[in-house]
Image (cartoon, rainbow, N blue to C red):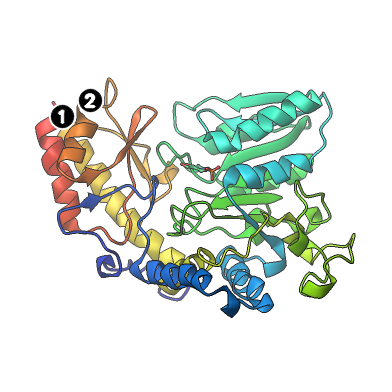
């Protein structure tokens, strides 16, 4: 997972993306651009449907099994532990469908957490009578301590991200995983804003479920995602029943010999029509690129970039952010005193500087396509707009 050069930051990889020189796209946490190679793979994937007679029964399995292996490698899992999901909400629905709680138990989440990792748990709380608990935002940005203080013997589920989607506030998932195991709670992680940029090791964190949408830090397409299911959870009941998840589905002539057995491991949780001839090759190409770069080296480069921006924002404008030791290195939220100036987002967009406002923070999420010139463009607008 991490090579010997893991802390050497990668240089700019802008040439691999189709980003005009005058665009400063600092918004990977919104939607990443597709690498050019992934778009080409998608074009040939889409073209297959022009000639369906060239699509063989084995094609329903081959690319998806390769992609399963690639994603498993990224998080130090086995291919058998990976299911395809259309979205995080889908993955969390699979998880929530397979957890029984008593009325005396709690489901623990963070304040202002992304809704796809909140609504499925509100629904489970309603169905089971369990109590839905929100950990308030800690004034010192120490989400790990705040979360640990809410985990006790009554905790049934802990549903959290690896870093907060508004400002990158980091959660020590190894500590949370250990605490969950101590009290017998189920750990469900939304890795959408981290996997691909922040190393994630299922062997060290040991989550029960990890859902990841592909269109941000995995540099993949929209409507595509993954669900890691721990081996101890792989005998569960899926929320939908599709033909390909059943044993011997490779035998197209025998599909009506209905089977009660499933394919191996987490495959029973695959979303219907997961073979996805147009998008699967896109995901494969993007995952290959991320693995070639090495997540640790991506993180090293992005940490350097966000830290430079955070320091300049502090010294030039007195704008603070989550301290570096409590923030995921790839992620930054600038906290303007009195809130983000209302006209600033429009002013930035007019200058082709792309960031997001989430909660009270201005979220700046660079990637390897960014250059020093992009950062200069950002500060040129801030200089005019922040008093
Ligand atoms: C933390 C987080 N999780 C999930 C998603 C996307 O959720 P879904 O795949 O359910 O649309 C987003 C999108 O912004 C996000 O920020």
Q: Position of residue 85 (x, y in %)?
A: 62, 53
Task: Tell me the quarter of the image containing the C terminus.
Answer: top left
Residue depicted at 64% across the width and 45% down the height = 90
Badge 1: residue crowd in 10 Å (few <14, some 14–19, many ≥20)? some
Nearer to us of marks 2 and 1 is 2
Q: How crowded is mark 2: few (under 14 residues within 10 Å), some or many (20 or more)?
A: few
In this picture, is 63 found above or below 269?
A: below
User: Foreground: 322 or 250?
Assistant: 250
- In the image, taking residue 361 as reference, residue 76 lies left or right, namely right
* Label 2 close to label 1 by CB (< 8 Å): yes
**Left or right of 298, for residue 174:** right
Q: Residue at x 29, y 67 (%)?
A: 13
Q: Residue 386 carries which label?
A: 1
Give residue 166's position: percent from left, percent from top.
Answer: 42, 36
Residue 243: image quadrant is bottom right
Picture layout, residue 321 above or below residue 105 = below
The Cα–Cα distance between marks 2 and 1, rounded to whole angstroms, is 7 Å
Residue in front for this viewpoint, 373 or 221: 221
Q: Say if 168 sits above or below 287 in the image.
A: above
Residue 179 visible to an observer of this rendering = no
x, y percent for residue 112: 50, 29
Q: Does dot 2 land on a helix, a strand or a loop?
A: loop
- Say which label, 2 or 1, has the lower sequence index: 2
In this picture, residue 92 sits left or right of residue 200: right
Q: Quadrant of residue 299?
A: bottom left
**What residue sits 61% from the left and 66% below the top?**
72
Q: Which of 324 and 221 is in front in this view?
A: 221
Q: Mark 2 points at which residue?
A: 341
Q: Residue at x 86, y 65 (%)?
A: 256
Classify mark 1: helix, strand or loop.
Answer: loop
């Amino acid at each position: 997972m991490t090579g010997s050069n893991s802390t050497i930051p990668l240089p700019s990889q802008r040439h691999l993306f189709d980003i005009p020189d005058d665009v400063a796209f600092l918004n990977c946490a919104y939607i990443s651009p597709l690498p050019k190679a992934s778009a080409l793979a998608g074009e040939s994937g889409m073209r297959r449907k022009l000639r369906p007679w060239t699509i063989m029964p084995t094609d329903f399995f081959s690319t998806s099994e390769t992609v399963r292996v690639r994603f498993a490698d990224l998080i130090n899992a086995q291919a058998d532990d990976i299911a395809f999901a259309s979205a995080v909400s889908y993955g969390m629905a699979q998880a929530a469908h397979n957890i029984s709680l008593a009325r005396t138990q709690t489901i623990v989440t963070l304040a202002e957490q992304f809704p796809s990792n909140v609504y499925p748990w509100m629904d489970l709380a309603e169905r089971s009578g369990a109590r839905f608990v929100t950990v308030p935002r800690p004034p010192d940005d120490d989400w790990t301590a705040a979360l640990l203080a809410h985990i006790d013997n009554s905790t049934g589920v802990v549903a959290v991200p690896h870093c907060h989607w508004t400002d990158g506030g980091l959660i020590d998932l190894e500590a949370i995983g250990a605490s969950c195991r101590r009290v017998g709670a189920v750990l469900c992680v939304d890795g959408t804003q981290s996997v691909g940029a922040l190393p994630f090791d299922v062997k060290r964190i040991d989550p029960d479920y990890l859902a990841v949408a592909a269109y941000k830090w995995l540099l993949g397409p929209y409507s595509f995602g993954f669900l890691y299911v721990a081996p101890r959870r792989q005998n569960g009941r899926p929320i939908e029943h599709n033909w390909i998840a059943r044993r011997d589905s490779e035998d197209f002539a025998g599909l009506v010999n209905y089977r009660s057995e499933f394919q191996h491991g987490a495959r029973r949780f695959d979303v219907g029509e997961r073979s996805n001839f147009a998008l699967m090759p896109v995901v494969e190409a993007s995952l290959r690129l991320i693995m070639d770069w090495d997540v640790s080296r991506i993180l090293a480069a992005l940490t350097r970039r966000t830290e430079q921006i955070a320091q300049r924002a502090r010294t030039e404008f007195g704008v603070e952010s989550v301290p570096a030791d409590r923030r995921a290195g790839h992620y930054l939220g600038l906290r303007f005193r009195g809130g983000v100036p209302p006209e600033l987002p429009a002013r930035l967009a007019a200058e082709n500087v792309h960031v997001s406002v989430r909660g009270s923070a201005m979220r700046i999420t660079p990637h390897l396509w960014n250059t020093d010139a992009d950062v200069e463009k950002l500060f040129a607008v801030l200089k005019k707009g922040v008093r």
